[in-house]
């Protein structure tokens, strides 16, 4: 297991990776979508 990481850090890493994928797929549109998602939480 990953001893140095707790669940929150793992969740943050996974969400950041998903945002990076969104940016690479959609470019600027991905950034706009990211902002809309951030407003929901």
Image (cartoon, helix red, strand yellow):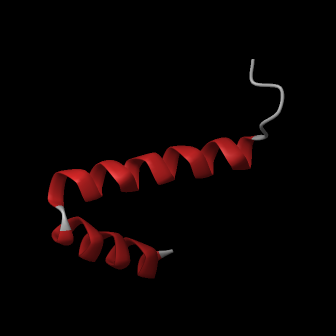
Q: Give the quadrant of the N terminus.
A: top right
Residue 29 placement, left or right of 34: left
Q: Residue 9 in the image: x percent, y percent?
A: 70, 47
Specify the farthest residue to the top: 1
Residue that protrudes farthest toward the bottom in the picture? 39
- In which quarter of the view is residue 33 placed? bottom left
Residue toward you, 40 or 27: 27
The residue located at (19%, 71%) in the rendering is 28
At x 57%, y 46%, the residue is 13
Residue at image coords 16%, 59%: 26
Instruction: State the residue lying farthest toward the right.
Output: 3
In the visual, does 41 lie left or right of 4? left
Specify the quadrant of the image occupied by residue 19: bottom left
Residue 7 in the image: state x and y as whole percent: 73, 41
Task: Please say if 28 is above or below 22.
Answer: below
Question: Foreground residue, 39 or 35?
Answer: 35
Q: Where is residue 29 in the image (x, y as percent from the top left)?
A: 17, 70
Camera-nearest residue between 28 and 1:
28
Q: Number of numbered discs present?
A: 0
Is residue 13 found left or right of 18 in the rendered image? right
């Amino acid at each position: 297991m990953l001893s140095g990481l707790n669940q929150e850090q793992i969740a943050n890493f996974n969400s950041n990776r998903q945002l990076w994928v969104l940016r690479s797929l959609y470019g600027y549109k991905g950034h706009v979508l990211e902002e809309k998602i951030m407003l929901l939480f």
